Image: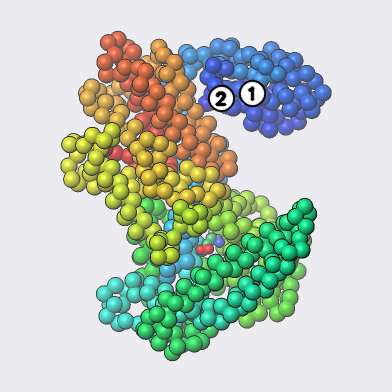
Amino acid sequence: MHPLAVIREQLSPLFQEYVGDPSPYLEMVRPAQDSKFGDFQANFAMPLAKKLGKNPRELATEFVEKLQLGEICETVEVAGPGFINFKFNSDWLTARLNEMQQDDRLLISSADEPKTIIVDYSAPNVAKPMHVGHLRSTVIGNTLCRILNFLGHKVYGDNHLGDWGTQFGMIIFGYKNFLDEDQFQQASVEELARLYKLVNQLSEYHELVKKIPDIQKKIESTSAQLQEQEANADPKDKQQRKAVGKLKNDLAALKEGLISAEEKVAVVTSSPELISQANAHPDIARLAREETAKLHRGDEENLKLWNQFLPLCIAAIEEVYQRLDVNFDLVLGESYFQPFLQTVVEELQQKGLAVESQGAVCVFHEGNEAPFIVQKTDGAFTYATTDLATIRYRVEELKADCILYVVDARQGEHFKLLFETAEKWGFDKIDLRHISFGTVLGDDKKPFKTRSGDTVGLESLIDESIQRARTIVDVGDDAKPNPELDESTRQSVAEIVGIGAIKYADLRHNRESDYVFNWEKMLATNGDTATYIQYACARICGIFREVGTNRESLRESDSKVVFTHDAERALGLQLLRFAETIEAVVADYRPNILTAYLFETANALTTFYGNCHVKNEPDAAIRASRLLLCDLTVRVLEQGLALLGIQTAEKM
Ligand code: ARG
C-alpha cells in the first residue's frame, strides 16, 4: 500500500461515529505543501467539526488519539486550527523502497475488480488528411488505454472512424468530375485529398457568394443599432452599457466573418481554373450531397468507389498512427453499424421513446429543447443513431462495463443526449462517460492554423517536431556538443524527443482547457517537458555507465536504500507516490496528474543529485543506496512516460 493509502485506511473506520460516508473527508488528506509540516496533511477536521458543531482542534485530537500509526509514522500532530500533520518513519519508507526495488510493477497493484472498458478515441472523419484537431483525442485516448491496460482491465481501444459521412459524397463527386487519372495512379491518397478539398472549396464558394450580401446587410443594421444605442444609452445604466458592449462584439464578429468570407471567395475568383470550375458547377453542394445519399441507398457504382477509396484513406491515417506509436484493438467505423440502424429506430419507436416530429424521428428529453434526432426528414439516419447502435454492440457483443468517449468538448450536448437516450432505452448499467477536451490554439489564441489559414496537418507537425528535436540532439544537453552519438542514433533520438514533446505538451494540460501550441516551450530541455524528463533518464543511465554498475545486479545485491540527507528522503517519498498518482489519474481520467508527478519526480532527482554525491561518495553503502535511488527513479520515470506513450533513450 502506498503511504497515502495507509493513512486513509487507518482513518477510514474512525469516521464511523461521526458520518456515514467518509470518502469526501478522506479526499482531504493530501501531500503537505511544505515538508517542514510533515509528509501529508489532513484538513477534514474543519468542515467536519462545523457540520457536527464541534471544536475542530478537539475533533482533530480525537482522531489522532485513536490512530495507530506507531510503527509507520514518526509523528502525527495537530496544528493550527485543526490540521493533522503526518510524518512517516524513515525506516518504514526505506523498507517500502526496498520492496519497490524488487517489484516489476513498482508497487502499483492491479485493479481489484477488472472491468471491460471501451476507449472510443481518435475517430477522424477519413478522406481528409489527419490534422492537429485529431491530436488530443488520439494522445489522451491512447494514454488512457495504456494506463487501464496496465491496471489489468480488459481494454478495447476502438477507432470509431467517420467513414460513412458526407465527405465521401464530395470525393465521389470529385472523382466523377475532376479526376486527374495520372495523379490517382501515382499518389491516390493525395489525389483523393485534393478532390475532397476542391469540391469543398467550390461548394463553400457558392454558399459564401450567396451569403455575403446578407452579412453586409447585417453589418449595416447592427452598426445603425449600435449608433442609436450609443447616442441614447445612459452611461450609468449597467444594463444599457452591457447592451452596447454586446452590439460592439456582434459587429466585430460580423466584420471578421465578412473578411474571411471575402478572402475565401477571392481565392477562387483570382484563379482562372478555379473560377471556371466553379461556374461550370453552380449546384455542386447539392450534387455532392446526392452522391452521399446514393451511397447510403446502396447505389452500386458509389458503393464500389467507396470500397475502393476507404482502404486507401485508412492506409494514410495508419501511417500517422504508426509514427505516433498508437495501436487500436478495434477499428469499427460508422459504416460498420449501418445495417443495424433501422432496427434501432424501430425499437425506440416501439418503446415510445422516439416520436415523429415535423417529419423527423426524435427522442425528446425533459429540460432539453433540442431533440435527439435519430432519423431525418429525408429518411437518413444520423450520427446519433450510429452511436446508439454502437452502444448496443459494445454492451452485447463486447460485454462492456464502461465506455469512455474521448471527444472534443464541443460535442458535449450530443453525448449528454446520447447517454440519456441509452439509459431510457435499457442500457442503464453501463458507465458511459464523455472524456471531453479543449482546443489546440495558435499564438493568436484561435484554433491553431498554418500561416495560410489551413488546418495544420498532423504529418507535417510530426516532421517539424522531429526536425526541431534534431537540432537539440545535435547540440546536446547543457549546450555541449555530444560526440558520443553517431548519425543514426541522433536521428532515432530526435524521433523519440520530437514525438515525446508533442504528446507530453498535449497531456500536461488539464484536458478540459484549451492550450496554446508553442514549440519553444514544449521542447525546452529545462521545464515541464518530456525532453527534460528524457534527459534526466539519460543522465542517470550515463552515471551507471561511468561507474560500471549493472542495474539489475545492483537490485539483486544486498544493498539497501538508507537516508542520510533530506534530499534522499524527499526523492524516496516522491517515488512511493507513484501508485497514488496512477489511482488519481484514473479516478477522473486525467493524464495531466501523471505528467505533473513525473515533472516533480525529475525535479526531486535534480535536487538530490545537486546535494548528494553519487559517483564520488566514499562510503560504499551510501553510494550503493544512492545508486539504488537513481535506478528506481529512472524506472519510475520510464514507466510513467511509457504509460503516456513516450519513449526514452539510454544516450542523448
Ligand atoms: N468522427 C467524429 C468527429 O470527427 C468523432 C467520433 C467520436 N466517437 C463517437 N462514438 N461519436 O467529430
Secondary structure state at the residue bearing disc 1: strand
Is 648 placed left or right of 399 in the picture?
left
The residue that mark 2 highlights is 33
Query: On residue 400, which mark appears?
Result: none
Looking at the image, residue 293 sits to the left or right of residue 626; the answer is: right
Q: Position of residue 32 (x, y in %)?
A: 56, 23
Whole-angstrom CA distance, mark 1 to mark 2, is: 11 Å
Q: Amino acid at mark 2?
A: Gln
Crowd around label 2: few <14 · some 14–19 · many ≥20 (10 Å): few
Q: Residue furthest top?
A: 619
Q: Which residue is mark 1?
A: 42
Q: Amino acid at mark 1?
A: Ala
Vertical placement of residue 383 versus 159, above or below? below
**Which residue appears farthest toward the front when viewing the image?**
231
Q: Nearer the viewer, residue 148 or 34?
A: 34
Mark 1 close to ligand 1, CB under 8 Å: no
- Which quarter of the image is occupied by the C terminus? top left
Q: Secondary structure at mark 2?
A: loop
